[in-house]
Image: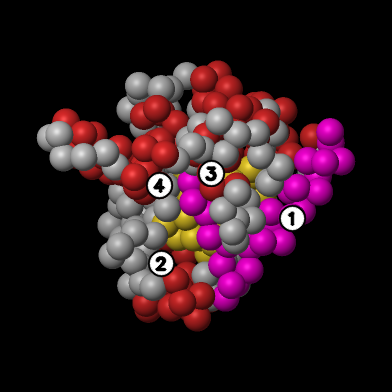
Amino acid sequence: MTTDLAAKADALLAAHRSGDPLVLVNVWDAWSARVIAQTAGCEAIATASYSIAAAHGYADGEQIPVEEMIAAIRLIASVVDLPVTADLEGGYGDAGATVAAAIRAGAVGGNLEDCLRPADEHALAVAAARAAGDAAGIHFVINARTDEYLLGEKNLDVAIAAGRTYLEAGADCIFVPGAGAPDDVAALVAAFEGRLSLIVSPKALPLGELARLGVARVSVGPGSLGIAAAALRDGAAQLLARDGFPYTLTYRPPGA
């Protein structure tokens, strides 16, 4: 088990390529994981905390009990053969214990967000996550998140300082959701030596431009849940309006 997880962790880390970014379409349960895993080009599976919480009836922001979050990660990891990286929010009060539980559930990487806590404080959580991976015998791939652009003043220097602190504490990649201006992306890539992770949306720079700038990882967060929910909404509207039967009624998720 440890050997298999170690190999998956190494594969996940290798998939982070500056200039040829790992593209992650986030999942929230078994069927979404199977659908994405069996789609051409998928190299890894990433969970989204927002989506898992929403699917369980909770708001985002560590409102879902950590045991339920870990159970969801375990289910997702059990139905795919690809590396799984889990959104672990801020670490649920004990990043080391949470990462250890996520590894036992089958995850080989994870996001840890700072929620604008002081960088030196969040660095302790990153270091605890690294220690948990080392204790498990794997290189747990840490995507450390600074919320400076999402919740703060969008100060480039502050984001760079935080990211460098997290890299020194053991992070593999720095996640800066909300950053998107070409000059800022280029500066973040340079500051982190290519180890930059971004979230994308229809307002984001095209993937080709992000690759040209040197980004190593992109994800969609709850956007994939939005895709699924919008499709369900539109199909339901067609049915309830007695406007025929959507063709997608014939689709069945893999493994279902």
In terms of sequence position, does the residue under pointer 4 or pointer 3 come before the other?
3
Residue 19 image point, x, y percent: 57, 75
Q: Secondary structure at mark 2?
A: helix
Q: Quadrant of residue 165?
A: bottom right
Counting from the top left corner in percent of width and height, residue 23 is at 53, 60
Q: Earlier in the sequence, mark 3 or mark 2?
A: 3
Find disc 3 in the rendering and name its residue. 35
- Pointers 4 and 3 in contact (CB under 8 A)? no
Q: Amino acid at mark 2?
A: Asp
The image quadrant where one finds the N terminus is top right
Crowd around label 3: few <14 · some 14–19 · many ≥20 (10 Å): some
What whole-number distance in Å separates the C-alpha atoms at marks 1 and 2? 32 Å
Specify how the rendered protein is coloured.
secondary structure
Question: Is there any visible trace of residue 86 in the rendered image?
Answer: no
Identify the residue at horizontal 40%, vertical 27% (top origin): 55
SS under mark 1: helix
**Residue ID at (36%, 29%):** 54
Q: Which residue is mark 1?
A: 11
Question: Which residue shows up at 34% across the image and 59% down it?
Answer: 201
Side of 146 where 228 appears, left or right: left
Q: Position of residue 230 (x, y in %)?
A: 28, 43
Label 2–label 4 contact, CB within 8 A: no
Please give the residue where the numbered disc 2 appears in the rendered image: 157
**Amino acid, disc 4:** Ser
Q: Residue furthest front?
A: 244
Quarter of the image where the C terminus is located = top right
Q: Is residue 237 left or right of residue 172?
A: left
| Residue farthest along the right direction in this orientation | 3
Disc 4: which residue:
224
- Labels 3 & 2 near each other (Cβ < 8 A): no
* Marks 1 and 4, how far apart at CA: 23 Å
